[in-house]
Image (spheres, rainbow, N blue to C red):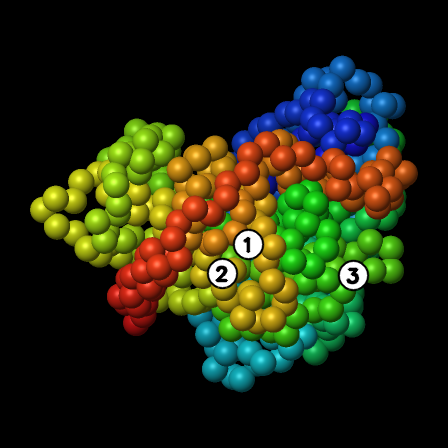
Amino acid sequence: MILAIDEGTTGAHCYVFGADGRIAGSGYSEFTQHFPQPGWVEHDAQEIWEATQRVAAEAIAGAGLQAADITAVGITNQRETVVVWDRSTGRPLHRAIVWQDRRTAERCDELKEQGHEQLVRDRTGLVIDSYFSGTKIEWLLRNVDGLAQRAAAGEVCFGTVDAWLIFKLTGQIATDYSNASRTMLFDIHELRWDSELCDLLGVPESSLPELVPSSGVVAECDPDALHGVRAPVAGIAADQQAALFGQACHRPGLGKNTYGTGNFVLLNTGPEAAPASEGLVTTVAWRVGDETTYALEGSIFVTGSAVQWLRDGLGIIESAEQTEAMAASLDSNDDVYFVPALVGLGSPYWDSYARGTIVGLTRGTGPAHIARAALEAIAYQTVDAVDAMERAGGATLEQLRADGGAVGNRWLMQFQADVLGRSVLVPEVSQTTALGAALLAGLECGVWSAADLASTWHEAARYEPRMATDERERLLGTWRRAVERARNWAV
C-alpha cells in the first residue's frame, strides 16, 4: 500500500493506492490563500504541513489500514512555489510565494533587457518569467531582513513544496530533478544546480536542496511526523510530470493534458531534451535510476477559470456542469469566439499583455454562445500548444490522455478530439497526479516492475475525432484571428 501526498495550490490531498493502482482511501483539506497585494499570492507553509498530517491520517483510516501497513510514501506538489525555512529549527521564515505570484514580473523584464534570456533558455529549458522559482528566491533574499546574510552562512534553505514536505517527514533536505527543473536555477542537461544562474540571482548554491531521483529512497519517515508511518519516501515528482507518469505516458509520442484552472499539456520526448522552442518549455519529466526522461510543456493559464468567471463574474451560469448542455444546445458557434486572456496568454504565445476578448457578437448572441465559446477556447488553446510541440520536433503526439475536472464534460472532450484530430482518452483513476507519485514510489520499493506500470492505467472513456478536416481548419483559423485581436492589448 502506497501513501501518495498530493500538495496542490488550494488544498492537500492524500490517497492510499493498492497494488492494482486503484484508490483504497483518501483525505482532503483546503488551506488558506493569502493575497497581501494585487498580484501577490502566498501560502503558510506550516499550515500546509498541518493539513498534510490531517489528510494522511484520514486516507490511512479510510483504507482500513494501520501506519505499519504503508509500504512507501510518494510526494507530488504545486511546482514553482518557494518555501524558505531555518535549517536547525525547521521554522518557515516567510510565507511561501506561490507559482501564481507576479511580484517579480518587472525583475524578469529587467533580466530580459540585460540579455540573459538565451542563457536561461539554453541551460534550463525555461523562459524568464515570474512563474518560475528563481526570481521569487531572489526577492526573498532582497526583502526579508537578514535573510541574505543567513543564507550565505548556510543557516537557511530554499525549496519547492516537495523539499519542504521531505524535510518535515524525514529531516532530510532534498528535491527531485523534475521540481529542480522548474526553478530557473538548474541545468537540465548537466543535471545540476547552475552556478552562473545562481550567481545571477544572488542565490547561494549551498542554500538549495540535494538533488535526488524521482524514484528512489530519500529517507524513512520519522514516525512522530506522520502518525507512526516509518515507510521510506521513495517517489517525488512535480504535479504535471507526475500526471504524465500516472497517465502511463512512458515513451516518446505519448502526452497528457490536465484540464484544471489552467491546462498543462506535456509530451514525452524521451531521453534527449528537445531544443528550447518559442512558446514552450523543455522540462525534466522524471529521473528513474540513471535514466532521465524529458518532456515539452505547454502551459495554458486560463481554461477552467474562464468557466468560473462565467459563473462568478458574469453570472450567466450557476455551475460549470451547465455548460455541457448549453454548448450542445447550439448547432454551431455562430462565429462567436472567446479568447480567455484574463491574466495574459501562456503557451505558445507567452504574451503577458494580452487581455480577454469576445468577438463575433450580434443581437442573436446569448448565454449559450458565451458558454460554448469558453469550452471551445479550452480545446483551441490545447491544439495551439500541441501544434507548437510538434513543430519543435520533440515527437508526434499519438493520442492525448486527459485528466482533471473538465474531463467529465463529454461535449468538451468530443470537441477536443475533433479539433485536435487525435483520440482523447480519459482514465478510470482521475487522480493521475497522485497515482504518478505512488507509481514512482512503488517502482523503487518493488511493488511494481517497469513492465507492470502500464497495466495500472485503465481506460474509462475514449473520444475519436469525427469532424471534417475543412471544418476543423476553418474553426482553428478563425480562432487564431480572434487571438490576434487579443494580443498586446495592455501595452
Looking at marks 2 and 3 on the same chain, the residue that comes earlier in the sequence is marked by 3
Where disc 1 sits, the SS reads strand
Q: Quadrant of the N terminus?
A: top right
Name which residue lies at 80% across and 29% down.
19
Q: Which residue bears the numbered disc 2?
A: 385
Where disc 2 sits, the SS reads helix
| Rendered position, 67 above or below 250 | above
Left/right placement of residue 178 relative to residue 116 reads: right
Name which residue lies at 54% across and 70% down.
391
Amino acid type, label 1: Val
Amino acid type, label 3: Thr
Q: Which residue bears the numbered disc 1?
A: 265
Q: Quadrant of the C terminus?
A: bottom left
Residue in front for this viewpoint, 219 or 479: 479
Q: Residue 119 at what x, y percent from top left?
A: 62, 80
Left/right placement of residue 106 relative to residue 128 reads: left
Amino acid type, label 2: Ala
Structural distance between the alpha carbons of marks 1 and 3:
19 Å
CB atoms at circles 2 and 1 under 8 Å apart?
Answer: yes
Answer whether residue 263 is visible to the viewer in this image. yes
Name which residue lies at 75% across and 71% down.
189
Q: Which residue bears the numbered disc 3?
A: 292
Q: Residue 217 at what x, y percent from top left?
A: 87, 45
Structural distance between the alpha carbons of marks 2 and 1:
7 Å
Name which residue lies at 78% across and 61% down.
292
| Rendered position, 342 above or below 231 | below
